[in-house]
């Protein structure tokens, strides 16, 4: 089926806009394919790269001009005072931005910041020739405060657009674009200063900021077309978000320490620079050339090794390089306090900060929820950096003015602070991994989180309002949440619910009072024994049994009464609380109920057998398990679960295979424990069919003993994929039940890699066939996709036998979508817990394996024949059957290609008979039904 994918040559010879033509250049296509981007994201990548380049160029020009004119006007020893002033200015601008953000959208706040920056730069350029001294001071404060906010806003935008996995690839690229801009800015300051003078640099800065504003508008316009670009707002304030998140607090401390170290290094560098270049123009040129050289070297490292390091190294390892390098060079400065180690340390710190530090920090922000990240990140980036500068400034003022410390002593402080920074990074990385694990486990609600939330005054007020509401559903939810608080007002509201008209509310209130141990001050619950609602009567019986001073007498009194409903209710209560009244029911009472023969008495006897202390008598329980009445048998099975006996195993095993009783029988057999393992292992052989295998495996998982695990492990190690699936599914259930690993870590890794190999092998044919037009070929693709999904599930469940299973179930749900945005948190989590060699196949499957773009390439008969042979070699019955069905499109394949095994699936045999036995090839029995809907 040939398909011409090229243009016919008719019509418009230039059907694409010139911008699209540029994006079709081979280099751009190769780059975006390497980065794992979609076709529509190429323009956004180009725009954002240009934006960050212009922002860094503008910031470098501003920084060079700031330092040069400030040092020329005030000197290096005035820098500590400037640090404090910048911190105060930053606090004002962040407060102002918060007020603006509450009135406008985030996009509006960003644009307002840019307008302020453009206006101030234009004002500074106009005023500088007239008032150099005052402009130098104000310009330093503005550059270190409001102008700094522009950069965090870009990274907030980037964090919204790109997920954490692509951030490892794209953020180094953005950093490279920023370094190009910084290199250009340094070159402008270093080589154009003699031509345009310092005031000319201010006009250039204004032009760059205007260009950044225009690019930001273009990015926002393009980004609106992306489905992932949402603009939600966090409900809490910045302080509330910071206060309740230990992860954000630790991240802020790590950022603060990095700024403290960088500021101390930068102060030493500027001190020696001013001494070496007292002339302002020479100082401006030196700083411009130094920053240009530093950005140039950073760019080389960024292009050559930064992306590779972030992808191959652990995030902690790549982040820790910077403090370790500063400690090493700082130690050199301690041994030989000269200008050379300080200049080298400033250069290394600047290079590592731009090459690895910035990208790593932005990736750490990925663990913060997007709405909260948009609110908290600009404030943290600005306030933490500026107030860390202020702390350094105060310490330097005290050290120089009060203590008389000399500048070379700062090298020792640099080493100490870098060491503290390294220790904090270790704790931050642990918190980062825990934060991602928590995000993947969001389907589980931790009781501790609920307990903490309902203790807040606002939450208590909401609970009280709900408990006084008329809506039954709201009251029931409020009662469940009230279990986690002991506040007197909540307790009074619970008691008032006893008079509610809804039986569900009354029953829930009684149950809650029992769990909380609340006394019935008005003695209303006793009257509930005669309530029309059975649920209310059952809850009242349980409460009175649990709180009675003479529980045995209470039970016997109700059992001797004539009210059959009360007798059932009190037995139900005693069954759930057997230790409240041990010995309340004698075996003779049970025998008398069985001998009476009535259905009601047999029901009471079946329930009462589960309340006996010690071993239950076997004969009465056996007779009730075989009772023809379904309700009597169900209650007897419940009692067998409560009082397990080895003698009950033989009559319970046949019930396990009966659909009506399999659940109750499974729980009763699991209660027997290890003695049931040999019989269940025999069922795993398959002699009783696949359903018996599944039930036996599930029962072994509920037993969860070492012997049961060994039987399930035998399944997981076998060659039969269906049995391996059973083994892994139930081994992971054992892991959840036991709350401890059930397999050695190395064995879990080996099994994971085996299943990942099958997953990757099935992906290529799945995507190839799903892209075809023929329904039969798409059906084969769907079969391969199901095959791959099952292999992925087995792989994740293999890991769940050692690692925390709740997060891994979230990993599976995200990975099966095979979308980079959805799978990014899962890949980030796996990369943090798995050794590099074990994670590598996952990265290849989800981040590196090429995907076909554009129109699908049609299959020729030879290629199709090879795919069919490969499908047959998988051994999967459904894929084999579908492959035989599809083989009618390849006449070259003969019946000998499909060699049958002794235990071949009936579906496969039927397809072969239909394909080569002379039957109607268009009506294959096993596959046609699915083909018609494909």
Image (cartoon, grey):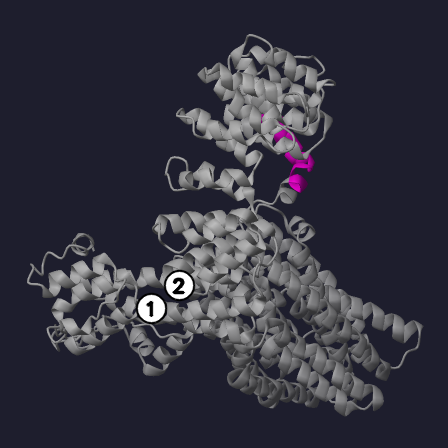
Q: Position of residue 142 (x, y in %)?
A: 66, 67
Q: Position of 155 compared to 754: left or right? A: right
Q: Is residue 234 above or below residue 639?
A: below
Is residue 861 visible in this depiction of the protein?
yes
Q: Position of 510 compared to 9: left or right? A: right
Q: Which mark is residue 762?
A: 1
In which quarter of the view is residue 302 placed?
bottom right
Q: CA distance from mark 2 to mark 1?
A: 9 Å
Please state which of residues 783 and 42 is positioned toward the viewer in this rendering: 783
In which quarter of the view is residue 793 placed?
bottom left
Q: Which residue is mark 2?
A: 791
What kind of secondary structure does the magenta stretch mostly adopt?
helix
Pointer 2 or 1: first along the chain = 1
Magenta region: which residues? 451-467
Tell whether position 463 is magenta: yes
Q: Residue at x 79, y 66 (%)?
A: 391
Label 1 crowd (10 A; few <14 / some 14-19 / many >=20): many
Is residue 368 visible in this depiction of the protein?
no
Q: Which element type, helix, strand or loop, lies under badge 1?
A: helix
Q: Which mark is residue 656?
A: none
Tell whether position 43 is magenta: no
Label 2 crowd (10 A; few <14 / some 14-19 / many >=20): many
Q: Position of residue 253 (x, y in %)?
A: 72, 63
Please state which of residues 61 and 551 is positioned toward the viewer in this rendering: 551
Please state which of residues 733 and 2 is positioned toward the viewer in this rendering: 733
Q: Position of residue 34 (x, y in %)?
A: 40, 77
Q: Residue at x 69, y 21 (%)?
A: 492
* Residue contact between numbered discs 2 and 1, judged by CB atoms under 8 Å: yes
Q: Residue at x 88, y 70 (%)?
A: 398
Q: Position of residue 127 (x, y in %)?
A: 64, 72
């Amino acid at each position: 089926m040939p398909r011409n994918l090229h243009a016919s040559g008719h019509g418009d010879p230039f059907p694409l806009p010139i911008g699209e033509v540029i994006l079709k250049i081979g280099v751009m296509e190769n780059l975006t394919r390497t980065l794992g981007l979609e076709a529509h994201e190429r323009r956004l990548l180009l725009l954002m790269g240009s934006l960050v380049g212009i922002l860094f160029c503008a910031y470098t020009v501003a920084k060079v001009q700031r330092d040069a004119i400030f040092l020329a006007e005030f000197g290096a020893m005035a820098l500590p005072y400037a640090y404090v002033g910048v911190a105060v200015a930053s606090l004002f601008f962040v407060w102002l931005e918060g007020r603006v953000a509450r009135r406008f959208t985030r996009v509006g706040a960003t644009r307002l910041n840019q307008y302020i920056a453009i206006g101030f730069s234009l004002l500074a350029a106009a005023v500088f020739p007239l008032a150099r001294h005052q402009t130098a001071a104000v310009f330093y404060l503005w550059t270190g405060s409001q102008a700094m906010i522009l950069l965090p806003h870009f990274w907030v935008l980037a964090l919204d657009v790109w997920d954490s996995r692509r951030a490892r690839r794209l953020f180094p690229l953005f950093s490279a674009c920023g370094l190009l801009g910084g290199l250009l800015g340094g070159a402008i300051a270093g080589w154009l200063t003699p031509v345009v003078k310092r005031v000319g640099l201010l006009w250039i800065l204004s032009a760059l900021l205007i260009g950044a504003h225009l690019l930001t508008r273009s990015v926002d316009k393009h980004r609106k077309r992306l489905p992932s670009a949402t603009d939600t707002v966090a409900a809490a304030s910045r302080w509330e978000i910071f206060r309740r998140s230990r992860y954000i607090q630790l991240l802020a401390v790590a950022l603060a320490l990095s700024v403290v170290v960088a500021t101390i290094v930068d102060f030493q560098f500027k001190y020696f620079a001013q001494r070496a270049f007292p002339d302002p123009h020479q100082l401006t040129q030196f700083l411009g050339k130094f920053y240009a050289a530093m950005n140039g070297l950073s760019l080389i490292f960024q292009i050559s090794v930064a992306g590779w390091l972030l992808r191959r190294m652990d995030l902690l390892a790549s982040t820790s390089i910077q403090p370790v390098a500063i400690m090493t060079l700082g130690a050199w400065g301690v041994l030989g306090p000269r200008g050379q180690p300080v200049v080298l340390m400033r250069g290394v710190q600047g290079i590592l900060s731009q090459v690895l530090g910035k990208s790593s920090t932005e990736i750490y922000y990925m663990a913060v929820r997007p709405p909260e990240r948009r609110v908290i990140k600009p404030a943290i980036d600005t306030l933490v950096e500026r107030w860390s500068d202020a702390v350094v400034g105060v310490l330097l003022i005290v050290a120089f003015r009060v203590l008389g410390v000399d500048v070379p002593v700062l090298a020792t402080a640099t080493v100490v602070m870098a060491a503290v920074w390294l220790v904090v990074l270790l704790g931050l990385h642990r918190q980062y991994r825990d934060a991602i694990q928590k995000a993947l486990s969001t389907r589980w609600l931790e009781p501790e989180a609920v307990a903490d939330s309902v203790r807040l005054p606002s939450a208590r007020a909401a609970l009280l309002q709900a408990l006084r509401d008329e809506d039954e559903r709201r009251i029931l939810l409020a009662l469940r949440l009230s279990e986690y608080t002991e506040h007197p007002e909540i307790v009074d509201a619970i008691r008032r619910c006893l008079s509610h008209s809804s039986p569900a509310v009354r029953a829930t209130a009684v149950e809650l009072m029992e769990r909380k141990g609340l006394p019935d001050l008005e003695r209303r619950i006793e009257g509930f024994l005669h309530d029309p609602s059975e649920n209310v009567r059952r809850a009242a019986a349980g409460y009175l049994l649990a709180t009675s001073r003479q529980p045995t007498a209470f039970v016997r009194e109700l059992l001797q009464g004539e009210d059959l409903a009360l007798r059932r209710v009190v037995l139900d209560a005693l069954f759930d609380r057997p230790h409240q009244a041990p010995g309340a029911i004698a075996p003779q009472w049970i025998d008398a109920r069985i001998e009476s023969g009535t259905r009601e008495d047999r029901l009471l006897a079946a329930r009462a057998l589960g309340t006996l202390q010690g071993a239950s008598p076997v004969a009465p329980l056996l007779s009730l398990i075989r009772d023809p009445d379904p309700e009597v048998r169900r209650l007897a099975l419940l009692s067998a679960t409560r009082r397990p006996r080895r003698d009950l195993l033989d009559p319970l095993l046949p019930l396990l295979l009966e659909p009506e009783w399999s659940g109750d029988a499974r729980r009763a057999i699991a209660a027997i424990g290890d003695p049931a393992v040999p019989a269940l292992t025999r069922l795993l052989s398959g002699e009783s069919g696949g359903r018996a295998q599944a039930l036996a495996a599930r029962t072994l998982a509920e037993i969860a003993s070492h012997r049961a695990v060994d039987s399930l492990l035998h399944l997981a190690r076998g060659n039969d994929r269906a049995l391996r699936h059973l083994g892994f599914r139930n081994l992971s259930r054992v892991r959840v039940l036991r709350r401890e690993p059930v397999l050695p870590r190395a064995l879990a890794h080996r099994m994971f890699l085996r299943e990942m190999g099958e997953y990757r092998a099935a992906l290529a044919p799945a995507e190839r066939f799903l892209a075809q037009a023929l329904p039969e070929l798409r059906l084969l693709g769907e079969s391969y996709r199901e095959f791959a999904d099952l292999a992925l599930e087995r792989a994740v469940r293999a890991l769940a036998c050692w690692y925390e299973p709740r997060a891994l179930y979230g990993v599976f749900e995200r990975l099966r979508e095979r979308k980079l945005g959805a799978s990014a948190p899962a890949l980030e989590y796996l990369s943090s817990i798995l050794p590099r060699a074990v994670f590598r196949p996952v990265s290849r499957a989800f981040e590196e394996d090429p995907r076909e773009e554009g129109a699908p390439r049609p299959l020729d008969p030879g290629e199709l024949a090879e795919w069919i042979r490969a499908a047959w070699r998988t051994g999967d019955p459904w894929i084999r059957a579908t492959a035989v069905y599809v083989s009618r499109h390849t006449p070259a394949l003969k019946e000998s290609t499909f060699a049958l095994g002794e235990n071949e699936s009936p579906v496969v045999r039927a397809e072969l008979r239909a394909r080569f036995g002379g039957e109607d090839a268009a009506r294959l029995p096993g596959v046609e039904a699915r083909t018609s809907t494909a």
